[in-house]
Image (cartoon, rainbow, N blue to C red):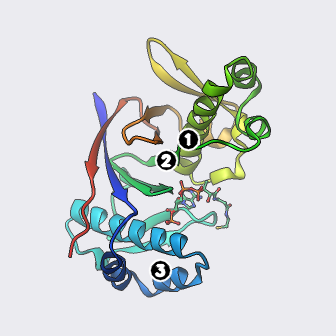
Amino acid sequence: MNLPVTIWKISLEQAPQVIETGYRLLSPDEQQRTDCYKVQKARESFILTRTALRQALAKRLDCLPEELHFDYSERGKPSLRVPRPSSEFSFSVSHSGELAVVAIADCKHIGIDCEKIRPLANAESLARTVLCEVEWNRWIELDEEKQMGSLLKSWTLKEACLKAIGTGLAVPMRDLEVRSESDIGLQLVTAQEILLTVAPWALAYFEQVSGYQIALAAAGVSKKIAAEFYEFHFDG
Ligand SMILES: CC(C)(COP(=O)(O)OP(=O)(O)OC[C@H]1O[C@@H](n2cnc3c(N)ncnc32)[C@H](O)[C@@H]1OP(=O)(O)O)[C@@H](O)C(=O)NCCC(=O)NCCS
């Protein structure tokens, strides 16, 4: 049996009126947050992603987007307060460049990360923070061209895991190892208690959108991830 995960792909290049309509849909605290962004692109990215998240969750939970209320963990992970979903329901959001993604699944902890494929400044020092020793030893032997893709892949997979449990980067990525086994696929190896208590982990990695890498992590799931990708169209 597989775990179906719905993934909405959201273009962050939208007409001003879509952004304006989205802004009006947001709750007062979300609008307040929007007003704090100094960089216009970051402001628009938040409005569009949050609007898409509200519309996608509302469709799934059969309610209106404005009826949703979010809570936030100490580290900023959003969850639903109203309507209160089952404990086997979770969602996750990521944005990078001109793309945002929303993942929704019937499991306790889902995490998604997307990264625009781009040249990385100081790749070696970044690799030191992202890769564990075993991964570093393999990575440093790769051609320079392959190093970038490989590093971004490790990064997205590990960030997806850390978003699933809500710690974000408070847990160092280099404490995690992602192994690719030919028979069972991607596996998470770690001694970090917080990730072990919610094991087993299911991981998946996609190059669904040209120019972007997308990774998914589901905790407490012994099934394989079956991702279903959809283009998001804004209502209204
Ligand atoms: C989670 C984290 C890795 C996301 O990094 P990012 O590069 O901004 O990445 P993404 O675009 O992939 O993800 C952003 C989304 O993740 C979600 N998110 C935020 N914090 C999160 C957390 N701790 N766990 C899971 N998801 C989180 C939000 O939905 C956010 O989107 P939004 O701001 O539009 O709502 C990073 O913000 C982090 O490490 N946060 C924890 C840091 C912390 O301890 N903060 C304490 C003060 S709040």
Q: Give x and y (percent) for residue 154.
A: 60, 34
**Three-letter amino acid code at the position of disc 1:** Thr
Above or below 101: residue 130? above
Residue 84 seen anywhere in this rendered image of the structure: no
- Whether disc 2's CB lies below 8 Å from ligand 1 is answered yes
**Three-letter amino acid code at the position of disc 3:** Glu
Q: Nearer the viewer, residue 161 or 102?
A: 102
For residue 30, which numbered disc appears in the image? Answer: 3
- Quarter the N terminus occupies: top left
Above or below 218: residue 165? below
Mark 2 lies on a secondary structure that is: strand
Above or below 181: residue 40? below
Q: Nearer the viewer, mark 1 or mark 3?
A: 1
Q: Quadrant of residue 134?
A: top right
Give neighbour class at mark 2: few <14, some 14-19, many 20+ (Cα, 10 Å). many
Give neighbour class at mark 3: few <14, some 14-19, many 20+ (Cα, 10 Å). some
